Amino acid sequence: MPDAIPGKSAKIIAVANQKGGVGKTTTTINLGAALAEAGQKVLLIDLDPQGNASTGLGVSPYARQVTTYDFILGDALPDQAIQATTVKNLSIIPATTDLSSADIELISNEKRSFLLFDALRQLPMDAMGFDFVLIDCPPSLNILTVNAMVAAHSVIVPLQSEFFALEGLSQLMLTIRDVRQSANKALRIEGVVLTMYDRRNNLSQQVEADARENLGGLVFETVIPRNVRLSEAPSFAMPALSYDSQSAGSQAYRELAAEVLSQAKSQLRKVS
């Protein structure tokens, strides 16, 4: 795996797709674990009211006294909200169903789209020295997802290798465009990652061909296979990389992490 990226503030990546069941949380957890395994210091922010990323990293409901909701509202400092996980270099701010009322409760807040942006740019965050912040977005294009995109440098889009996979992407791309025009001009698409890929299935191959034809270089070279270990790992409250380090799913997420690191280094060189 590539070496750590020196001399920079955290790169913030939102993992988003308004469709459920596309491997969004699985990607967030295992990409985070793979980056941590590569020596990066990673913070995962669970922005989904279902709290699946929190559960998948072993944070019990009883340990979620301070949550993402407290963090974005400014009711909790970073050191109060951030918890270590069993994975070295990987921390999390957990979520509960409190987030489900965010659309209603934040509607009157003038800075409602910038709450996560402000929370992540507090001075205590810089002192914690994270290399990457990964945001697990809810499966909808609501105020929480907009907060993630306003706060992020880029977006990773998991795309299920199934029929109609590309349908619905247009709405997500429009949301990204709107955020870019109104609130975060620097927001870019980090990449689209094909998930639940079955090389024996002609449909998966057709979806890949269509995605690469329509989206070109935006599609990561790495594809994430349909893998039983990826499905089993959350029930043991750990990433697949911890549950079965040598599984095809774990290896794929290491390859995806290598691509993300390579892109981050390339972007640093362009800036410097």
Image (cartoon, rainbow, N blue to C red):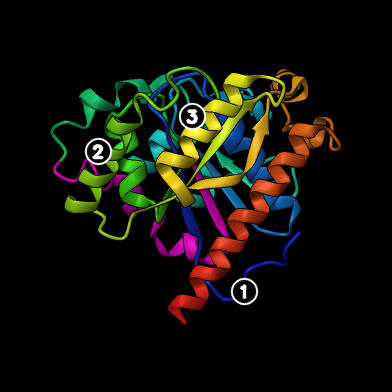
Nearest the viewer among 103 and 15 is 15
Task: Answer whether labels 1 and 3 touch (C-beta < 8 Å).
Answer: no
Task: Answer whether labels 2 and 1 touch (C-beta < 8 Å).
Answer: no
Tell whether position 173 is magenta: no
Q: Which residues are magenta?
A: 110-135
Q: Residue at x 70, y 48 (%)?
A: 255
- Residue 247 in percent (x, y) is at 83, 32
As drawn, 268 above or below 44: below
- First in sequence, mark 2 or 1: give its number: 1
Secondary structure of the residue carrying tag 3 is loop
Secondary structure of the residue carrying tag 1 is loop
Q: Amino acid at mark 2?
A: Leu
Read off the residue under disc 1: 6
Q: Amino acid at mark 3?
A: Ala
In the image, is 175 to the left or to the right of 14? left
Read off the residue under disc 2: 174
The tag on residue 95 is 3
